[in-house]
Image (cartoon, grey):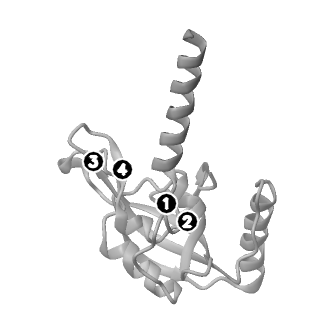
């Protein structure tokens, strides 16, 4: 009798958990905004906070920032560490640099269990000044970075699907070995 009660309890737990997790429209996250162009995404990034601290001091991505991310990046941590960014310059990449960045993106995507082929891919490089959420208000001095992004159209507008951050030292030289590839 004990075994049948335990089995019934486990079965009920599984059924209830399944019902709570299933969304009626079949999507895990419903995007609120549709970005037609890369410029729309960049405007969203620059005019809204990316990360914020909660009352316990834990860092969270904002919903405004999540709108800029691909489905895959929304499900995992984006690796973007800035509270806010100010875009200093959008660098024009020549065809060779664009091709190289997109090849890096494609190689990273091949390692995934379920890779997909987006309908539109655009590579861009940004010179930014970024501030971090974990610094106190007195030490919130913007620092220089170069960010490489690959944006794709997943059918719900342009979103960021690949991110590489490079620190720039005081002489505006890319500091080697200090980068974060945002591919989770």
Label 3 near label 4: C-beta < 8 Å?
yes
Whole-Å distance between the Cαs marked 1 and 4? 24 Å
Does 53 appear above or below 56? Answer: below
* Structural crowding at the residue carrying mark 2, measured as other residues with C-alpha within 10 Å and reported as few (<14), some (14–19) or many (≥20): few
Badge 3 element: strand
* Structural crowding at the residue carrying mark 3, measured as other residues with C-alpha within 10 Å and reported as few (<14), some (14–19) or many (≥20): some
Of 12 and 103, which appears nearest the observer? 12
Badge 1 element: loop
Whole-Å distance between the Cαs marked 3 and 1? 29 Å
Rendering quarter of residue 136: top left
Q: Earlier in the sequence, mark 1 or mark 4?
A: 1
Nearest to the eye among marks 2 and 3: give it.
2
Of 4 and 52, which appears nearest the observer? 4
Badge 2 element: loop
Q: Which mark is residue 183?
A: none
Residue 23, horizontal then vertical, whole percent: 49, 60
Which residue in the structure is indicated by mark 1? 23
Whole-Å distance between the Cαs marked 2 and 1? 5 Å
* Structural crowding at the residue carrying mark 1, measured as other residues with C-alpha within 10 Å and reported as few (<14), some (14–19) or many (≥20): few
Residue 37 lies left or right of residue 115; in this view the side is: left
Label 1 near label 2: C-beta < 8 Å?
yes
Whole-Å distance between the Cαs marked 4 and 3? 6 Å
Q: Which mark is residue 60?
A: 4
Nearest to the eye among marks 4 and 2: give it.
2
Which residue in the structure is indicated by mark 3? 53
Does 146 appear above or below 89? Answer: above
Does residue 164 appear in this view?
no
Nearest to the eye among marks 3 and 1: give it.
1
Q: Earlier in the sequence, mark 4 or mark 2?
A: 2
Does residue 7 appear in this view?
yes
Q: Which mark is residue 26?
A: 2
Q: Earlier in the sequence, mark 4 or mark 3?
A: 3
């Amino acid at each position: 009798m004990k075994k049948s009660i335990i089995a019934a309890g486990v079965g009920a737990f599984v059924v209830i958990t399944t019902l709570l997790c299933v969304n009626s429209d079949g999507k895990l996250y419903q995007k609120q905004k549709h970005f037609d162009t890369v410029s729309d995404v960049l405007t969203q990034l620059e005019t809204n906070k990316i990360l914020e601290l909660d009352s316990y001091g834990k860092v969270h991505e904002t919903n405004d920032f999540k709108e800029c991310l691909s489905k895959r990046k929304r499900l995992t941590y984006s690796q973007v560490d800035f509270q806010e960014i100010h875009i200093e310059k959008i660098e024009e990449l020549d065809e060779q640099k664009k091709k190289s960045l997109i090849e890096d993106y494609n190689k990273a995507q091949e390692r995934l269990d379920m890779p997909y082929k987006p309908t539109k891919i655009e590579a861009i490089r940004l010179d930014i000044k970024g501030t971090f959420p974990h610094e106190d208000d007195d030490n919130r001095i913007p620092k220089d970075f170069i960010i490489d992004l690959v944006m794709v159209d997943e059918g719900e507008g342009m979103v960021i699907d690949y991110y590489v951050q490079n620190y720039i030292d005081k002489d505006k030289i890319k500091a080697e070995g200090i980068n974060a590839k945002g591919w989770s």
